[in-house]
Structure formats: C-alpha cells, structure tokens
Image: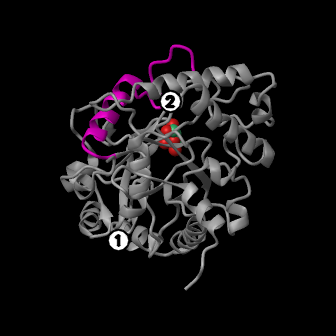
Amino acid sequence: MKIIHPYVWLLITSLNCTSEKGNTQVLPADKNATAETVSLYNNLPKLASKGFMFGHQDDLAYGVEWKYKPGRSDVKDVTDDYPAVYGWEIGGIERENNPVNLDSVPFTKMTQFIKEAYARGAVITLSWHTDSPFSSPSGAWDTTHGAIASILPGAVNHDLYKSWLDKAANFIYTLKGSRGEAIPILFRPFHEHTGSWFWWGKNGNTTEEYKALWRFTIGYLQDQKKLHNLLWVYNTSGDFNSREEFLDRYPGDDVVDLLSFDAYQHGDPKTDKSFEVNTNKKLSIVAEIASSKNKPFAIGETGYEAIPDANWWTGTLMNVIGKNKISYVLLWRNHGFHQQMKRMHYYVPYKGQASADDFLKFYELPVTLFEKDIRDARIYQ
Ligand code: BMA
C-alpha cells in the first residue's frame, strides 16, 4: 500500500469540498460557484460513465421548416424526446439596445427557452460570437489584428469590452430557476481560437494575449458581476495534432472547467473516412489531457451540413466518439434554407429527412443520452 504523506493528503482534501450529503465534490474554477453549478459539475463525469449527452443549438427556437412553435423541436419530431443539452448564442448582446442575437433570436425568448429546458432537467451551454472591438457592429469575423490587445486592461477599448461583459451579465442574470436560483451555464467564449476566422483567433493575437483575455473575463464576471453559475469551457477548432497544440493557449487549470473542440464533416464519408479517423484521434488526445487534469470533455460543435449521408449518425458520428467518455456532443443549428449561403444549413434531421431513420437508431443506443435518459439523474442536486 502506498503511504500518503500528511502534507499531500491535506493538499488533496483542500482541493475538494464535502457536500452536506457527505460526498466529496470537485469544485469548479469558480470557488464560489452556486450549489446547483457544483452539482452539475460533479454529475458530468458520472453521466459520462453511462454515455454522452446529445445537444443541439437553438433547438427550441426554430427548425428547418418552422419558427417559434411552443414545445416544438426537430429532435423531438423525430425521436419523441428532447436533447439533453441546449446550445444558445448570445452574439449581439454587446450591441446597444439590441433585442435579438446575430441569428435574429430574441433574447427574451432565449431566456424563456432556457428556463423551460432547465426545468425539465437539461443542460445549457452558451457561445458568444462577439463583435470585433474595432468597428462594432462588424461581427466576430472581422480578423483585423491586435483586437485582443486593444481590450485588455489599460488599452483603448478596455472600457468598451467591460460594457459588453456588463450586457452579457445582465442577460445571464435573467436565467433563473423556479426558486430564483441562477441556472448553471456551460460558458464557451472565444471558441475555435486555434483557427484564424474570428478576431480572437491565432493569427491576430499572441498566446499571452489570449490567456490574459480569458483570465480577465472570468475574473470580471465572477468578482465584479458576481456570476457564480458559469462553468468555463475551453474550446479549440479541430486543427490541433498534439497535446501541446491543443494546450498552446490554455489559460490554466484554475480557470477552465471543461475541455472541448469543434470539428465538422466535409466531403462524402462513404468515400473519404478522414473526418472520422482524424476527429477520433483528436478526441483521444483531448481524452488523455482531460484525464490527466481530471476535467470533463466534450465535442463543442459538430455536424454534417444537410446530412446527405443516410447513415451518418451510427456510421460516422458513433465512430468519431468511439470509446471516449465525452460529456456531450453538440450539433449545430437547424436554420433551414440560408439566403446568404444559398443552401440548406441544418445539422439535425427533421421528420422525413434522409438520415432520420438512422438518427432514431442512434437515439436508441444505450450510450446516447437525451432528456428522458438524464431526467432521473437530478444533475442539479
Ligand atoms: C455559423 C452559422 C451562421 C451563424 C453563426 C452563429 O456557424 O450558423 O449562420 O450566424 O454560426 O450562430
């Protein structure tokens, strides 16, 4: 038997806290996280030992052929069940008096959808395609270099950035459960940062600037805005090939709760297996890092636009995930026909869609967790 030195023992126990129920709980990055947030964080690995939660962006707001129909969801139309995870996007909240996000979803409706889903026991994650600080409202895709440097403390756009965080916090304050408790949120800001398509991306900013932005943001939202319901999701794009590359701009174990990356299927999976093989490899890299850091991990975004392959769910996505014990996989939004893109833009089947039967098979697999599978887990208690 290994003898543990008393000092090491003290260190181990001080990293954890003990709940009223006597269970040892792992604390998230926010040491003042609310009870529900701590419970969710501790339930993520428990759920991951059973399977992975299925998530969908904007699920309750619209589907391929509908908009704002109470209770409706393309996932539910096909499976008679709701997703276990809901992704919502707050891009646009930083604009002055702006009632809708960048995809025209009203923030008041978003609040309602989030409350509804939380009341049913689901998990909420938020992303933020924040405007560039240089020419608001220019969008997240203005990649003019030096954007991060311009919003760090002391820099020319710092007050502007703080005013954006104030607006985001005001929105997050509206997310309350029936007892007035703050709804826990998996917060995934500055996502796909290893790519070069967003202003916070790799090309236009140094590693140290990215880390400083992350650390300033978490500090401001926790200490100034008193938000204690956020779990912080670190997210890269799918372009890393090693532990070092994935962690290049990692801001630190003390400010990150979950690890994730985004990767999309392109090309025909029937003739080209590279997405499946490569994404599975990347997931294994992240799984190893997550295990060494004792943190849950996830696929932050994925999908095959318009899902032209009838077997993509069981034939490709299941192989991408493989044996990796991810917490969740989030499929991107079901916009329907996109006027600017001039093509269909959706990632989950609607009733009658080419991959709907396979999606049902995927749904029925014991490892895929939808709302009915997690309802009894009482993840917030
Ligand atoms: C992208 C597309 C865009 C959308 C953006 C933010 O992937 O879906 O149409 O504006 O995400 O949600």
Mark yes or no: residue 288 visible: yes
Q: What residue is shown at x 60% (from left), y 30% (from top)?
A: 223
Mark 2 CB near ligand 1 (8 Å cut) = yes
What residue would you read off at disc 2?
102
In x, y percent, where is residue 234? Answer: 59, 51
Packing grade of label 2 (10 A; few <14, some 14-19, many >=20) is some
Element marked by disc 1: helix
Packing grade of label 1 (10 A; few <14, some 14-19, many >=20) is some
Can you say whether 32 is above or below 361 in the image?
above
Q: What residue is shown at x 64% (from left), y 54% (from top)?
A: 253
N-terminal of the pair, mark 2 or mark 1, is 2
Q: State the residue lying farthest toward the bottom.
A: 1
What residue would you read off at disc 1?
314
Asked if the magenta segment contains residue 111, the reply would be: yes
Q: Amino acid at mark 1?
A: Thr
- Could you tell me how far apart the alpha carbons at marks 2 and 1 are, in whole angstroms? 32 Å
Q: Magenta part of the protein: which range? A: 95-122
